[in-house]
């Protein structure tokens, strides 16, 4: 069974059987290109209008419009990486509909499933707006990719273009209007057989005259794929209904499709329709949150998350964190004080200041701490690809969470950096000063520190072990590593006590190269 699915997937990539081509489109426009072009155009318009309101210049250089060029024009060059990542999230989620919903007609407007397909779009659009409002931008992008695929397929799979329309359907994304116009019922013939390979006039004249919507039927299964009498097929070599009377198809997925002469018109209208849907989201979310959904903000779009041990021996560390994090106040912040939680999210610098300044060291000191529980809370509460900084001088008590934390790191693609101020040697111990219970020693075993190193390495972060007096210097890494345009060129594990040589390549695009 798995080998059959693998073959089907490959054929889909090459033929675009369920919509505009996904990959290898040649001169045709595929789902990825349509989506990317619409996102870039819409984002450029948003940035242009924002610049006008703020009295800034907005200038696009000649040449192709790219994420990097547009981020610079939007006065947010540090967001180029996150902007490109957001575009990829949407485009690849769009492409994935052909695999997740291959046999679901409504996801492709096949088989005249117009009511169901439209409901997918309007329900999904409501979900996107709700997720943007809650700051769940990844979920918003995923749903956006899903509904854009269905929206774009309407223009490729239906006869909207054959009816002479060169503009988007006015009601396809509106939840307040149920009418999508006359639709051919199941008993109404809609097509005649193509003449050889010529399918340009296979839609019946009365369907065109009466402006009735229809779409092609599609089936992959030999001997079992059928369609109602007189109905159009999707068409193409994989569509088993296209050999049944009336033969041929009406899809406009590529220039080589049965109605490939209308492919360019369908793709151009799909771009405009995609932009209209993006503008609808923008109108509900506002310019700032729309740009954040697209990975763009003036101060970079990476979310910073701090997990801080607040037990008794951490007073010096907490003081350093307060000083070092002052620069981050314009970035989205997620904050998890231990032992452990509650989690706090904010983009408000005053709220963050109040929370961070309220920290004080108390208790603990006699046992390992719940550091992995705090990290788990951060990984589940922060958006994917966040930058997480954990400060502790104690070993982890909750080792049973190691597998869970590793799985969350892999799923979220977040980077975790540990600042460890407990000296290697004996375990942490509580001293007593005439019964006052004052913390005097903070130590962790080599194996304890190795756990943190392993987690850092698996996430692409670092485990930095310093004394408490050295911590202020070490936290400069926090400032540098939180840059939105940061990329890791090389990460390697060194052999303790032995000199190592590592080779890597850089080009002129690399600036501010730093080695730790």
Image: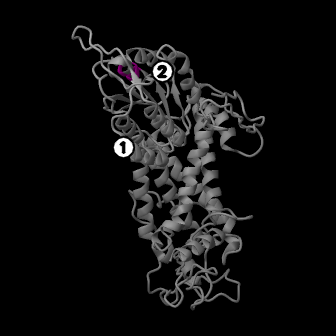
Residue closer to the observer: 231 or 377: 377
Corner quadrant of residue 477: top right
Q: Which mark is residue 401?
A: 1
Q: Can you see residue 287? A: no
Position of residue 105 in the picture relative to residue 198 (left or right) = left
Corner quadrant of residue 367: top left
Determine whether 126 is above or below 351 in the image: below
Q: Position of residue 415 (x, y in %)?
A: 51, 38
Q: Residue furthest left?
A: 435
Question: Count of labels shown?
Answer: 2
Give the residue number, with chain letter if any, for mark 2: 325
Q: Residue furthest top?
A: 434
Q: Position of residue 156 (x, y in %)?
A: 59, 69
Q: Position of residue 191 (x, y in %)?
A: 57, 85
Q: Can you see residue 185? A: yes
The image quadrant where one finds the C terminus is top right
Look at the numbered disc 2 and give the secondary structure of its residue. helix
Determine whether 246 is above or below 134 in the image: below
Residue 372 among those drawn in magenta: no
What's the residue at 38%, 20% (across, down)? 442
Magenta part mainly helix, strand or loop? Answer: helix
Q: Badge 1, how many Cα within 10 Å: few under 14, some, many 20+?
A: some
Q: Position of residue 453 (x, y in %)?
A: 50, 35
What's the residue at 38%, 37% (across, down)? 372
Residue closer to the observer: 389 or 232: 389
Q: Earlier in the sequence, mark 1 or mark 2?
A: 2
Q: Badge 2, how many Cα within 10 Å: few under 14, some, many 20+?
A: some
> What segment is highlighted magenta in the picture?
350-355
Quote the CA–CA distance across marks 1 and 2: 28 Å
Q: Nearer the viewer, mark 1 or mark 2?
A: 1
């Amino acid at each position: 069974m798995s080998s059959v699915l693998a073959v089907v997937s490959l054929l889909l990539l090459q033929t675009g059987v369920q919509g505009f081509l996904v990959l290898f489109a040649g001169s045709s426009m595929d789902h990825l290109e349509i989506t990317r072009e619409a996102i870039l155009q819409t984002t450029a318009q948003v940035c242009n209008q924002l610049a006008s309101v703020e009295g800034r210049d907005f200038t696009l250089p000649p040449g192709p419009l790219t994420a990097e060029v547009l981020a610079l024009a939007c006065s947010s060059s540090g967001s180029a990486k996150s902007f490109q990542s957001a575009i990829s999230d949407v485009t690849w989620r769009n492409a994935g509909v052909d695999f997740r919903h291959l046999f679901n007609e409504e996801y492709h407007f096949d088989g005249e499933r117009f009511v169901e397909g439209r409901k997918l779009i309007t329900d999904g659009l409501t979900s996107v707006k709700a997720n943007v409002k809650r700051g769940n931008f990844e979920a918003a992008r995923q749903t956006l990719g899903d509904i854009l695929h269905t929206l774009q397929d309407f223009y490729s799979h239906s006869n909207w273009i054959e009816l002479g329309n060169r503009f988007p359907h006015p009601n396809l994304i509106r939840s307040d209007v149920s009418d999508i116009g006359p639709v051919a019922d199941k008993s109404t013939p809609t097509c005649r057989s193509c003449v050889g390979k010529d399918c340009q006039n296979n839609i019946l004249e009365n369907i065109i005259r009466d402006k009735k919507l229809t779409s092609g039927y599609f089936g992959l299964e030999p001997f079992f794929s059928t369609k109602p009498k007189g109905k159009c097929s999707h068409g193409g070599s994989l569509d088993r209904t296209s050999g049944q009377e009336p033969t041929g198809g009406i899809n406009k997925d590529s220039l080589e499709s049965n109605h490939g002469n209308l492919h360019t018109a369908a793709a151009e209208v799909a771009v405009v329709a995609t932009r209209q849907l993006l503008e609808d989201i923008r109108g509900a979310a506002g310019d700032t949150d729309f740009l954040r959904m697209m990975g763009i903000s003036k101060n970079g779009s990476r979310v910073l998350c701090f997990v801080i041990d607040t037990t008794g021996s951490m007073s010096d560390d907490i003081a350093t964190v307060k000083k070092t994090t002052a620069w981050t106040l314009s970035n989205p912040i997620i904050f998890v004080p231990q032992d452990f939680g509650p989690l706090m999210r904010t983009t408000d610098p005053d709220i963050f200041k109040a929370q961070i300044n309220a920290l004080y060291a108390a208790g603990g000191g006699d046992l390992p701490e719940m550091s992995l529980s705090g990290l788990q809370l951060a990984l589940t509460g922060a958006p994917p690809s966040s930058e997480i900084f954990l400060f502790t001088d104690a070993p982890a008590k909750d080792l049973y969470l190691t597998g869970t934390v590793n799985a969350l790191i892999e799923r979220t693609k977040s980077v975790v950096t540990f600042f460890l101020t407990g000296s290697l040697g004996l375990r942490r111990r509580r001293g007593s000063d005439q019964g006052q219970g004052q913390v005097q020693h903070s130590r962790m075993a080599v194996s304890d520190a190795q756990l943190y190193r392993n987690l850092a390495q698996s996430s692409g972060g670092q485990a930095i072990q310093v004394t408490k007096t050295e911590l202020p210097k070490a936290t400069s890494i926090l400032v540098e590593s939180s840059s939105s345009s940061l990329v890791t060129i090389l990460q390697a594990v060194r052999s303790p006590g032995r000199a190592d040589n590592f080779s890597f390549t850089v080009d002129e695009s690399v600036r501010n190269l730093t080695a730790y």
